[in-house]
Image (cartoon, rainbow, N blue to C red):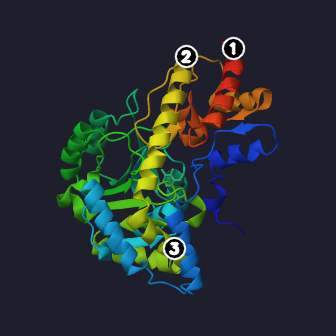
Amino acid sequence: MVNKRVQNIEISGIRKFFNKVSDYPDAISLTLGQPDFPVPISIKSAMIRAIENNKTEYTANAGIYELRKEISNYLYRSFDIHYSPDEICITTGGSEGLFSVFNALINEGDEVLIPNPAYPAYESILKIMGAKISYYDMNDDFSINVLRLKDVLASNDNIKAIILSYPSNPTGAILSNENKKELYEILKAKNILIITDEIYSSLCYEEYNSISQFQDLKDRVVLISGFSKMFSMTGLRIGYVCSNVTLMKEILKIHQYNVSCATSISQWGVLEGLKSALSDVDMMKENFVKRRDYVYSRLIALGLEVVIPKGAFYIFPSIKKINRNSEEFCLELLHKNRVACVPGSAFGSKGEGFMRISYSYSIENLEAGLNRIENFLNNKI
Ligand code: PMP
């Protein structure tokens, strides 16, 4: 009765763990990637105006032209990334962007390289497509292991595409300038598709680097991004995909048959946000840096091995010295001390031995959660 490939995937380990928290009403959840700031007021007002002015009809499949133009300007001004409005499609969050891109470009049996650990959607969507999945590894500091990647690409001519994901969920790693140049040299020489998920680009705490900054790779780079995190509007569901028009023509077919267009009201909200809410984004980013520093210093004080994140709002401490696998560890932590973090294994085999803490929560919540983690560890180590 059921599609076998769908039967063979599971709902994301992040959601699974989040759902478990409801069994513990007194638990503190540090599980979700969802900023706790309200949507910037100018975005809310623009959405209310859009409703009052009856802007509730279908938009163009690719999204409102003015918004695509504003995204084009924003990418150019902020990141030196060049896409014209015709090379941009507004999607129902980054999630639909990923789904439409993979559907449009990946055939059954195509081999795709994904990071390990990584955001779980890549693997699950590729499994639905019937793709063959291979993994590339990170160094101990979660930066990309360029030399190993070079070997993998040199020894395998079947690879159709590589997924890049910076700033990273779950590790908080970003792409350094040096790694960007090395990656460019490797990928210039290898004619494969490059799909780059940059949904956390507005939350990068150091210089921003992206493979999509190289114009001469443009015929095979696809950029996926969105506003869920940037404008703290996860429920309003606006993302976008950028690619050259040849690839975009195919991506748009899937997007059209799947959703027709992204929600009109939210598109008008984001358009106003790009014009007048970038200072709100700066304010949120400053707060995330404070939260990151706080959580990092607490984890160090607890004696855990941890790499300081340089982007997004996740931190990925090692729990290897505690004699449990990551799922057992997180279950026990939730059960005994009532704090929920996501087991590293939810992000792939190389996530085993780690847990993901989201610091998108208030300092008060983070402090209370870390106090509980401290109590838990004091009884363990
Ligand atoms: N990519 C990554 C790396 C993410 O972490 C997320 C959301 N957690 C998405 C894509 C999807 O974002 P959206 O909520 O806009 O669908």
N-terminal label among 1 and 3: 3
Mark found first going from the N terminus, 1 or 2 = 2
Query: Which mark is drawn over residue 46?
Result: 3
Q: How far apart are marks 2 and 3 (CA)?
A: 45 Å
Q: Give, as a three-letter code, the residue at label 2.
A: Ala
Where disc 3 sits, the SS reads: helix
Element type at mark 2 = helix
Q: How crowded is mark 3: few (under 14 residues within 10 Å), some or many (20 or more)?
A: many
Tell me the tag on residue 378: 1
Residue at 20% of width from left, 55% of height from top? 214
Instruction: Determine the image quadrant of residue 182.
Output: top left
Tell which of 330 and 206 is nearer to you.
206
Residue 264 % position (x, y): 52, 78
The response on whether ligand 1 sits within 8 Å of label 1 is no
Depth check: 261 or 50 in front?
A: 50
Give percent across and percent down for residue 284: 48, 47
Q: Disc 2 marks which residue?
A: 301
Q: Is mark 1 on a helix, strand or loop?
A: helix
Per the model, the C-alpha gap separating discs 1 and 3 is 50 Å
Question: Residue 227: x percent and y percent?
Answer: 47, 60
Please report whichever mark, 2 or 3, sits nearer to the chain's N-terminal start.
3
Q: Which quarter of the figure has residue 154?
A: top left
In this picture, residue 45 sits left or right of residue 209: right
* Nearer to us: label 1 or label 2: 2
The amino acid beneath tag 1 is Asn
Tell me if residue 116 can be seen: no
Q: Distance between the residues labelled 1 and 2?
A: 12 Å
Q: What's the residue type where badge 3 is placed?
A: Ala
> Residue 9 at what x, y percent from top left?
62, 54
